[in-house]
Image (tube, rainbow, N blue to C red):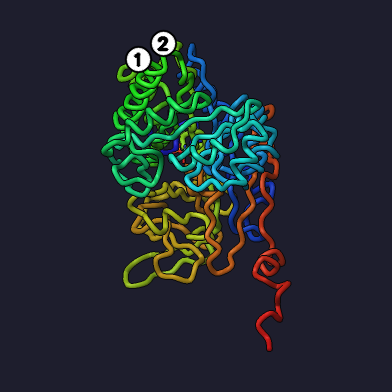
Amino acid sequence: MGPDTHPRADRVEQAVRAAVEAGLVGYEHPVAGFVDADGVRSTIRDLRAAFEGTEVLHAFAAKASPLVPVLRLLAEEGLGCEVASAGELAQALAAGFRPERIVLDSPAKTQAELREALELGVAVNADNLDELKRLDALVTPDTRAVLGARVNPQVGAGSIDAMSTASPHSKFGIPLGDAGSRDELLAAFATRPWLSRLHVHVGSQGCPLELIADGIHAVYRLAEEINANAGRRQVTSIDIGGGLPVNFADDTVSPSFAEYVAVLRQRVPGLFEGRYSLLTEFGRSLLAKNGFIIARVEYVKDVGGRRIAVTHAGAQIATRTVFMPGAWPLRVEAFDAEGRRKRDRPLSQDVAGPCCFAGDLVASERELPELAEGDLVVLRDTGAYYFSSPFSYNSLPRPAVHGFRATEGDLVFAPVRTGQTVAEIVAESGAEHRDALLA
Ligand SMILES: *Cc1c(COP(=O)(O)O)cnc(C)c1O
């Protein structure tokens, strides 16, 4: 299929058109984010189907899209939520997740965060042995929260170092392969009967399925060993993390959740024999393809033989793409001011953002239909992380995010996040302390 004949591409085209008609993007609003609620529901159906027949709680990794209405949709769909800070925990609770469907990760949990989690009944995966000692002081016979330990299986890194959490030197979890470490872990479980879960998250984006499965296999074997030592089923659940890579090159979902589960079933069949309940923590793979950014082209210029379209989407919203273009390339698509896909013959163009540094490009020398002032560019597959990783450089505002869904063939939009105003930017930049540095 060509790039613009996939059903998802049609859906985006319909949404861009409708967004322009609704005035959500254009002269007044030069950049905005969009979330396809039907698409999210459909991705969740794929996830559920892949794990059919297994007792599993799919906890969405909040950092991929910590927007309360998005979290609310996921809670409604029966998902759980993985959080890693007091802010994410509060967002999850505001969205209506029940505490027992929330799991708190994070390598830097404070005493206060641990206490709050236990009081609420939120599950906790301890990152290290010292955190387990902190839990010793907090656990009481009334503690309902499921408590576990995060293990670093040290199976190696994927193609993006910064996203690989199971490398030999990763900051996450209790290393499994270091001298003496496995015995310490076994002892930690032997002396803490309330520990009942193991957690592993091999990495995010760039990790092959086999690497992820190897990490899960190592943790499964550890669970079996702990249970054999204990002479009872002490470990009752395994949190297998998230990290399914997303294909940013075209509309194909690859790998799919079904392919992931097939690899897992082959490498770790014991996981599916009913002795353990499972937790997953997918983020990017649930949301990325169900969102996009629309930005207006402000100017077009020719410089040193290069054509540059200056748009309103740059490092302030596509931060990783701008700073690590090799690791985080995005598809950029050209639309006219009315929101119709441009189909002219492609021309090599740089697509730049509004930030005042030369490297603020979301694409360089990209073959695209020729862009003109007032046209729109669409950055595809940006539904995960792009709305949660803003860069406040140049005091550019966080753009609005809108959700949409189909009703009787028409797309209906709803506000998900209000765009930041200039007044808010001023207030957030210390306006209340205006005279603080005067004599
Ligand atoms: C970020 C993270 C995830 C989600 O990763 P994705 O690549 O978005 O699926 C899951 N678990 C933990 C512990 C994480 O840090």
Q: Nearer the viewer, residue 108 or 206?
A: 108
Q: Secondary structure at mark 2?
A: loop
User: Which numbered dot is residue 273?
Assistant: 2
Query: Which residue type carries mark 1?
Result: Pro
Q: Position of residue 251 (x, y in %)?
A: 42, 35
Q: Residue at x 50, y 67 (%)?
A: 355
Q: Are marks 1 and 2 in contact (CB under 8 Å)?
A: yes
Dot label at residue 295? none
Q: Tell me: residue 45, above or below residue 364.
A: above
Task: Report the side of 16 relative to 253 (left or right).
Answer: right
Residue 84, horizontal then vertical, whole percent: 54, 43
Question: Mark 1: which secondary structure?
Answer: helix
Expressed as whole percent of the image width and height from the top left, the position of residue 235 reads 46, 21
Residue 305 in view, yes or no: yes
Which amino acid, mark 2?
Glu
Q: Which residue is mark 1?
A: 269
